[in-house]
Image: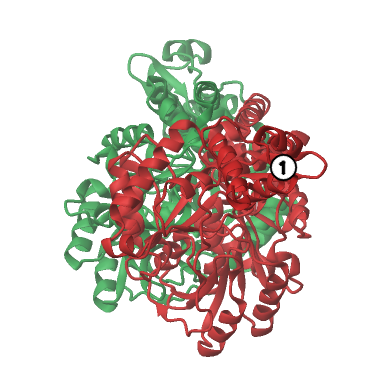
Chain colours: A red, B green
């Protein structure tokens, strides 16, 4: 018997054992010595079989311990195609993004139950609901008059203090006085844009970007200029530099540097530093949306604001993803527009109500909140791995995916020509919600994408729903793409 | 002894008793028979003495019960001078109202305690704090997951149902689906204005009007056209008609028809009907701010919206004045701009958080809320009478005042040439806060006015504070006015 066939046969034996679950993730492969004995093969054949399984991503070698079965990650997906960053961007008027977005939202709402891969929020059981509830009841018992009182226009001092302290975690030095508490990050983005720009102004945004941002721009009558953004490294600073030359009337830049929505990626620190410096040098305000930053696998990546020396960066963030989406709390650091933002906040909605702020400050200043954050990150990471594996396993050939290192979003490129919008509609009929790529741009560039949130607790039902989604994709893959695959 | 002197002597006797508090408001005068005996006078003299006291406003006759001591209401103040309604208004650019307003707010905030006649909110003890607290604790116990959930973009269905039902009280037929819950009336006004107008547009407003509205307009880059408004009857529809002829580019009209801020007055129904018809006929959207409507002495006066047949009226209101100012709840009916307002609300701040809405719906749908409203109206009315009396008694001659029939605001005209801003500054040093007239217009037309809220519980300390305020006014009356008085 030929050696090559022999090691392949041994490898196939264990591949089957792994495939059928006889050997589960974390189990140890028999030792090389045992393999030699069981299969009557030489040392080099046994080692070759193990290495083959390792190359296939089925097992990993651990020094001085042997080979261990990995979580199944069968077909490794190709990464998302990167954009051509040096083309001249075309300024897209905000025509109709609202209709796309509101149709999407209305349809998702009409589907009251079932899996929701469209919602970018962790499930209640991952969040500190009980401590928050207790903090609220405590506040209500001790200070019921809070229901009739007002806090300073910028927010409750206790919460502002906690937020300033937490900003240290992502490299930002801020005083409590600098913090403005808002109704979610969305109000912060509104205020930031209104502070620095007027209706009709051109705002540079990433492409793709959060549909909520596109909608804010449309609602304010501002025009988006979509800047090429790399699936792996975020906003292309080179492309932005070109755009600033080509369009000297760009009034502001909005970036989501950390665990981008929808891309999931983090900008490298060197690029962040370049971006901050470029905007400063050109006198263009830089608005940072750091909604997902706190959800990095190993803590929050550094914010753009950390490089800001002149107040040119307006930092916006949310407490929906780590505290409680139903409390609608966000916050911002206004940089040198701080006074104008104070005025706009007061004129737009007055200070936020005290109760939620007091309870949030209470919970977020506790030690157990750090433990909660660590646990949340671990759980989201585990879900991400399971979901990415399931997508790799069930989605049709030609699907592409980059697995991020945090956040709660997977940006999935479907086989060429597949309509994400048609997939969305089809999956919805099966009770499965997902965000179609088309809402993340004013162009049709991302029609063959889906944004799949891995916020939902990953149960067998979730995986079943993902298979339904995969079936919907399968059904929408055009014949041409099928033939090519 | 001459009869005339005799009845005067008897009257003087009881006048002294009333002045010194021996006879308190509500006490009964001795009967005519007793007077005859005590003072050894004839029936006609005794009756004449009583009538004299009645003429002086010290007692009132109650059929078959006798004469009763009234609350003191010594010098009756002249009503506020009415504006010349047929002059051509001048469009005031919103230059600097924010600075006036924010200086006012910052100064009021720096004064943490002491009487606050600047704040237009009832004290906590007048509001259903305990039922609200209980409703919140109930909601938290039963549905803590609410902290992580979202409601539909227009608000929680339970609250929208209650609000639609309550709208019947002021003559408005609305379905729950028409209601949009907002962050206070201020967000509702922002959304209404953004729905119908653009930056640079001219908006007709009352003169004087709520400083918050002027600030919203400034922050949105819109220009105010101040329309003469009568202290007794509100917006002059004649003046508005002239203005619509002179300025065909007026894009919207904003009116506070019920218990106007700061005037306190209610537009007569016939004028309301004319206003709605005029705006409809000219195709100019009419935005109604009904913040104080629910606080009429005898219930809520009819809203402008009640006359609206075509959706041309956008109704905005608040729950701060009757429920709890610290909950920051407001609401609106968008008329034919409903869909655009939905979009703007979603893009600006997303739906309000569920907890407050659920608790508000719970409290506002209870029978006891109607009892609370009735009690609140009675208490505010009693305070208004006490405050108006105290102003009449302590403010210098030349002070003018109309006493409204609801709301919680007194608009006080100071002797000619007195600077309300100087009074504000001086009173602040004595720990007393009040709203200077200057913030209610972009012009200087109301510099000699103060807005005095009677929301605060009227204690002896309140009356002492009002005397300090009177002293501050006294100190600022110019010598010329003093000589004239």
Figure quadrant of residue B13: top right
Q: Position of residue A290 (x, y in %)?
A: 62, 58
Q: Secondary structure at mark 1?
A: loop
**Residue B5, horizontal then vertical, whole percent:** 50, 30
Q: Is residue B264 above or below residue A128?
A: below
Q: Nearer the viewer, residue B338 or A228?
A: A228
**In this picture, residue B485 sits left or right of residue A275:** left
Above or below, B376 against A397 in this view is above
Residue that mark 1 sits on: B113
Q: Position of residue A302 (x, y in %)?
A: 72, 60
Pointer 1 local density, CA inside 10 Å: few below 14, some 14–19, many at least 20? few
Q: Nearer the viewer, residue B355 or B271?
A: B355
Check the residue under mark 1 and report the chain it is in.
B
Q: How many marks?
A: 1
Residue A52: x and y, percent? 63, 50
Q: Name the one closer to the observer, B359 or A474.
A: A474
Identify whether A402 is placed above or below B134: below
Residue B229 visible in the shown view: no
Q: Residue lying farthest right?
A: A64
């Amino acid at each position: 018997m030929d050696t090559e066939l022999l090691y392949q046969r041994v490898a196939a034996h264990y591949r089957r054992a792994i495939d059928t679950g006889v050997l589960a993730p974390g189990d140890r492969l028999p030792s090389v010595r045992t393999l030699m004995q069981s299969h009557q093969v030489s040392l080099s054949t046994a080692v070759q079989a193990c290495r083959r399984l390792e190359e296939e991503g089925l097992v990993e070698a651990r020094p001085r311990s042997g080979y261990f079965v990995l979580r199944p990650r069968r077909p490794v997906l190709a990464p998302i195609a990167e954009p051509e960053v040096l083309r001249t961007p075309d300024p897209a008027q905000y025509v109709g993004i609202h209709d796309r977005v509101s149709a999407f939202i209305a349809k998702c709402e009409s589907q009251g139950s079932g899996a929701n891969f469209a919602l970018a929020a962790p499930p209640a059981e991952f969040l500190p609901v009980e401590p928050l509830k207790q903090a609220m009841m405590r506040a209500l018992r001790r200070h019921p008059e809070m229901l009739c009182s007002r806090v300073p226009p910028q927010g409750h001092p206790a919460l502002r203090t906690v937020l300033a302290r937490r900003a240290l975690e992502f490299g930002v030095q801020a005083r409590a006085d600098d913090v403005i508490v808002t109704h979610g990050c969305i109000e912060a983005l509104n205020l930031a844009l209104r502070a620095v720009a007027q209706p009709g102004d051109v705002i540079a945004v990433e492409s793709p970007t959060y549909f909520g941002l596109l909608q804010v721009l449309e609602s304010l009558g501002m025009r988006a200029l979509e800047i090429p953004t790399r699936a792996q490294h975020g906003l292309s600073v080179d492309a932005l530099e070109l755009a600033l030359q080509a369009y000297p009337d760009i009034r502001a830049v909005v970036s989501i540097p950390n665990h981008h929505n929808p891309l999931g990626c983090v900008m490298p620190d060197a690029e962040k530093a370049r971006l901050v410096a470029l905007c400063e040098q050109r006198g263009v305000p830089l608005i940072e949306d750091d909604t997902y930053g706190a959800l990095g696998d190993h803590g929050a990546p550094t914010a753009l604001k950390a490089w800001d020396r002149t107040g040119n960066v307006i930092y916006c963030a949310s407490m929906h993803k780590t505290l409680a989406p139903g409390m609608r709390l966000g916050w911002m650091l206004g940089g040198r527009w701080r006074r104008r933002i104070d005025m706009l906040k007061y004129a737009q909605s007055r200070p936020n109500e005290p109760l939620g702020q007091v309870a949030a400050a209470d919970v977020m200043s506790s030690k157990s909140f750090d433990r909660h954050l660590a646990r949340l990150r671990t759980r989201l990471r585990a879900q991400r791995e399971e979901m990415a594996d399931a997508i790799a396993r069930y989605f049709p050939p030609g699907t592409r995916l980059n697995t991020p290192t945090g956040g709660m979003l997977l940006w999935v490129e479907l086989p060429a020509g597949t309509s994400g919008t048609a997939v969305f509609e089809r999956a919805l009929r099966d009770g499965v919600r997902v965000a179609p790529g088309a809402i993340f741009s004013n162009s049709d560039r991302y029609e063959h994408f889906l944004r799949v949130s891995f916020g939902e607790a990953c149960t067998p039902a979730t995986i079943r729903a993902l298979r339904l989604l995969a079936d919907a994709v399968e059904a929408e893959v055009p014949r041409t793409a099928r033939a090519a695959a």
